[in-house]
Image (spheres, grey):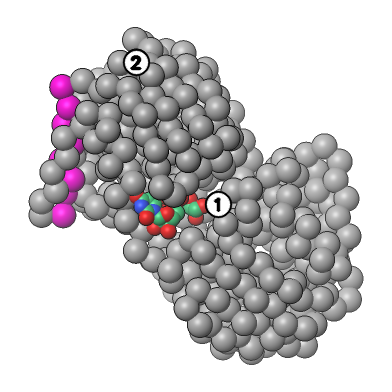
Amino acid sequence: MDKFVVEGGRRLDGSVNVQSAKNSVLPLLAASILTERRVTIRETPAIADVSCMAQILRELGAEVSFRGDDVTIDSANACSHRISSALTKELRSSVFMLGSLLTRFHRAVIAYPGGCDIGLRPIDIHLNALKRLGVDITERDGYIFCECERLRGAEIPIDFPSVGATENIMLASVKAEGRTLVQGAAKEPEIVDLQNFLNAMGARVRGAGTDVIEIEGVKTLGGVEYLPIKDRIEAGTYLIACAVCGGEVEVCGAKPENVGLLLHKLRENGCKIHIKNDKIRIASYGRLKCNRRIETMPFPGFPTDLQAQVTALNSVCEGCALIVENLFETRFKYVPELQKMGADIEVKGRTAFVRGVKGLHGASVVAGDLRGGAALVIAALAAEGTSEVLDLSHIDRGYSDLRGKLKGLGAEIKRVRI
Ligand code: UD1
């Protein structure tokens, strides 16, 4: 198991390139088995979740080959519709495989999915939607068994704009008979990316990015070579790291409109933001001011995946901040670790009350989940003295070469095997 050793207090300066979006690439990998033709996804990030998804595809009988950052999936010989519980439990996104497997084989068996421990994460919306498409679902011994004679297009109103459920419906309905209408769909940029990918394969999907998505079932889907969108959460993480540490950083690749609310909040803190095409330049000098209130919401609201990082930021700003987490019940688990570094934060249910302190001090902390782990690294970069961030397995799930990229910006950070 590895750890980061961070010598805090360095300014960050320079420029950093953003990886392809984890939350795009994972559903695109799931979508690759919709066709027997070859699919190439370009510039995939070197993260553990991608390797795990590749393992799942191999387990189904697909050939998955990496050439540099590009991954090619040839699922002509895929024959299995069953994913072992070891892999399903490692990766929440394995739930997307339900929609893809049903389209490809009309059958799917998966264990209840895993992922970050940030709350209950039920999949009732996914399963109810699949039922409306004509799928029979039974659950026993921790496994979900799905089966259908054929998939039939349907009107699917969803109660909450779940990202994964919206994507699963798209994957299950691309070849369904007739038209599917998703009402109350999630509007995340990654859903638009999935629509573009599916349409490049020959699907007929429109409306992604709005709350109504229409899918007209097609008979066949072809191969595709596709470049996914960039990772707005990774981009946000580097912007926040610079805000906390001070300095001037250019974050290249991510669409500024996909991090619009974060940029607004960073300006509120007192950072200067300059946008030129897909380059976001941030300058941060002196002590920043707390945001009065940040509340996580489905897109275009403030992303829950940046909640931990902005809490770390506010913990060293002047004043007080209220951070409200509306998506996941237990997404403040990193707070006790931040407290070890001197942060003054009180959590009550879904709300964190942050009283900004003048500075943090180095400590030994454990990264218990992906984004909470990123927040601890950010805090360690700003803290006085040496910190160690233990258990990098969650951080490795979502950030390609976090150490190298931060080092490139001037951070003192080492990865050490223990
Ligand atoms: C996706 C993202 C994740 C992000 C989250 C919210 C991927 C791979 N992951 O996760 O990084 O934090 O969106 O933006 O894209 N819910 C139910 N029943 C369901 C499905 C969801 O109650 O069937 C609830 C969840 O418990 C949660 C909320 O809906 O409270 C949002 O979940 P959802 O949008 O589905 O998130 P994921 O797709 O799991």
Q: Quadrant of the C terminus?
A: bottom left
For the magenta stretch, what is the residue range? 142-149
Task: Identify the disc placed on residue 178.
Answer: 2
- Magenta residues, dominant SS class: strand
Q: Quadrant of the N terminus?
A: bottom left
Query: Alpha-carbon distance for marks 2 and 1?
Result: 29 Å
- 364 sits to left or right of 167: right
Up the image or down, 407 lies above or below 320; here it is above
Q: Nearer the viewer, residue 145 or 83?
A: 145
Q: Is mark 1 within 8 Å of ligand 1?
A: yes
Whether residue 146 appears in magenta in the rendering, the answer is yes
**Looking at the image, how many numbered discs can be counted on the residues?**
2
Whether residue 256 appears in magenta in the rendering, the answer is no
Residue 398: where, in percent of width, then height?
A: 51, 53
Instruction: Spot the residue most to the top.
Output: 219
**Visible in this render: residue 198?**
no
Residue at horizontal 24 percent and vertical 36 percent from the top? 131
Identity, as a three-letter code, of the amino acid under mark 2? Gly
Circle nearer the N terminus (2, 1): 2
SS assignment at label 2: loop
Task: Identify the disc placed on residue 298.
Answer: 1
Identity, as a three-letter code, of the amino acid under mark 1? Pro
Up the image or down, 47 lies above or below 75; here it is below
Tell me the quarter of the picture where residue 352 sits. bottom right
Tell me the quarter of the picture where residue 179 sits. top left
Residue at horizontal 55 percent and vertical 27 percent from the top? 207
Residue at horizontal 34 percent and vertical 15 percent from the top? 178
Residue 253: where, in percent of width, then height?
A: 72, 40
Residue 16: where, in percent of width, then height?
A: 74, 50
